[in-house]
Amino acid sequence: MSSLILQTPSALNVDIPGTAGSFKVSRKGEDSKAIEVRYMLTHVSLSGAGPQQQLLDMLAPVREVFDLEQLGFDEIMQRDIDDSRVSLDLIPYLLEHTNTGMVKLFPPIVVVVLPLKEVSNRPAERYAAITRSQEDIPGHQNHKWDLVTAGGPGREQFQFRQVVRPDGTLDSNNALLRIARTNCALAIVDGQHRAMALLALYRNLTQQWSDARRTIYQQYYRVWSDSDIRGYNLAELQMPMIICTFPQLDEAYQGNMDVIRAARRVFLDLNKNAKKVSESRNKLLDDQDMVSHCLRATLAKVKTLDIKSPTPLRIWNIELDQAQDRSVISSEVALSGVSHLYYIVEHVLFTSDRVKGIGARKGRLARSRNLNEIYTRMGLLDAFTQQERAQNTRNNYSDKVATTFDKHWCKQYGAVLEQMLGEFHPFAAHCKATLRIHEQLKAHNRTKLRSLLFDGQASSRTFGEFRKRLDVKIGDDPTWQTPELKEIKNEVDAQISEYAEEVTRLRSERSRMFLEELHGAKSRSVLADGIVTEPVQEFLDTLYRETFTSIAFEAAVFLTLVEAVEATQPVADGQGVAHVTPGIVTEYLTSLHRLFKPTTFTSLANLVATFKGNLVETDGAVTIVPTNRTFGRLVIAGEMQPDEWPKYRYLLLEAWSPTEEKLQKFVEADLAEARPQVMRAAFRRAVEAFCLSNSRPEKDVTTKERLELLAEVVQQYEEFLSKLRHKRQSLSDVAESLKGSLVIIASQSNEETQASET
């Protein structure tokens, strides 16, 4: 009796007909390593059944396909979807509210077939083994199917089928792409807003919002009812779509490219001339910028931090998609951003001259291309040949250089940056507060609120904009003034209210964490029963908003230590510069914490005095009285741009007391150069203020008046330093050395006038 041999059923279960084509993507200067992109041009429609419905079911934004918390940093490549714009702009544009009932079409959606790892809903680096074959087409003599298949029988991921004509050429117009829903995913790399408009309509019609990853976004699209949608000619609603595969990138591929990187390359190429992507997102994705490469390496490490990590730092503490290309942090849970870290990385890689004094950093680093400085600093001179060093630049480098830089950057600088973000007390307090709020929202199953705060970098901005525009719609358009739409608006208002309350709670928790070690008799006037008193709460909120989360301050915290160690700890030739070890970082931060981690009422008063004024306690209540003896009045002369970070560096040098002798001398030497600059600038502003208040030209300010102004500046400066350094500091020697240059006596007609000033 012969045995029965059963054929293994194919995993391919979604058939997509269309027109086939191909193009190539490569990194700049590496045309020989170009990767073929084989694509299917098709369309997706609301009116089709069968395959069209399968395609719509499978198509989804990355945020719904994968659990973003489980993805590696390089696997996150898209900016957040602006659901407010999709619902209130793109859907009306798609349906077009006109008497004609005609439908507008969009440019193609671009999708990549992502392979999935076995027993995991995560993208694999490459496809399963690609096989190429041909088979006869029944009923079509001399015609064959040309097959490109990823994966073996029963485990296929995709299969391209193209007709081979009798002359052996491929017929692009007769093609079929087959996909396995269980073994791959369709990730939208361009046009996700257009796609979301179509998907939202489809899901409203079919009631397919129940999935946990979808339901939190349904609130944006409930305003489009089933009857409202069906009032349009959906039979003509089609959207073109290009589905891309990379047949070279299977498990046998020996290069360093993978599907994620290839998809990112497609995304960047498509967006060069499209609607502008945020500058921060472009920096994240750029595969032809060594600064972006090192930045991603750092963020990839942050992305892996979890429950067993000793630091409270999490990826949500870094704003990845900053609004309107501004450097100001808008996410309530973020303390830093791509612009901040990019600035720091760029400075480390391309600055050869260290900063001195309080003047703004000079030079435009964006123009820097040569990697020679960082070869030396990282001790990589022997890692590459002279020819390799000459050929590779900031925007054109080999995979070998990228891999080597990645390893050395993370070890020498990335680890230090991560340690500072997680251990410097102002940063750590913020991270711990956000972590606590996150876990509490998770424990109480407050999914929507947790999503607004943590899931998408732009979620809160998008939801706030949606609420404003919905209010305008309901107020201006009679067709939107229905009871149900008004109820939806009430729900949105309630959620905005809950969000505002949670933000207030987050800030309160952050202040409590900031003052968690405060003790002593007067501490209850500041922190009682876990509540921080209002004047101190407002002071800390301002300090976080204007100082701690600024590019200038964060650059100063990192670069002050790195530059000092590299300048004072020489090593053998060819070994680069000294590494900043975890121990050195800990000692540095411990020293700074004398100012930035208050443990007593007095130390808190010193912090307040440094940045705002006098902290006064009367009968158990505290107030803050502003003074002119602060960092902002004595050192800062206007808005703090990123390149003004040396001013914060000066502040940190005053607070830093190194124990190592060479570092001590380094700090003392830099302070000896910076203090006269501070005094000059403060005196200059004092004279200008005197002239303004007395309505007098500067030439009429007498020597006596100038000397009095100088004495007043010296007194203010000494009081500022005594609070900052926790001890009296005399500046008489600095004042005496400057007196001659600041106050020049000239006699003319028996009157003292100002003749010149150095």
Image (tube, helix red, strand yellow):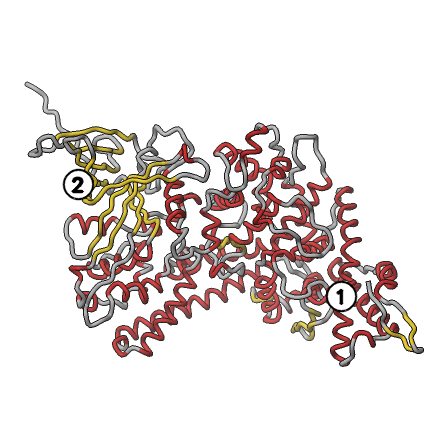
- Could you tell me how far apart the alpha carbons at marks 1 and 2 are, in whole angstroms? 77 Å
Q: Is residue 139 above or below residue 238?
A: above
According to the image, label 1 marks what residue?
Answer: 682
Front one among 254 and 1? 254
**For residue 293, which numbered disc appears in the image?**
none
Residue in the image at 55% along x and 31% along y: 388
Front one among 84 and 165? 165
Front one among 422 and 394? 394
Front one among 629 and 176? 176
Residue in the image at 68% along x and 62% along y: 607
Looking at the picture, which amino acid does disc 2 mark? Asn
Residue in the image at 57% along x and 33% along y: 390
The kind of secondary structure element at disc 2 is strand
Can residue 689 be seen here? The reply is: yes
User: In the rendering, at what x and y percent does residue 313 appear?
Assistant: 52, 50
Q: Is residue 715 left or right of residue 644?
A: right
Q: Please tell me which of labels 1 and 2 falls first in the chain.
A: 2
Q: Is residue 400 left or right of residue 552?
A: left
According to the image, label 2 marks what residue?
Answer: 174
Q: Is residue 513 left or right of residue 676?
A: left
Looking at the picture, which amino acid does disc 1 mark? Ala
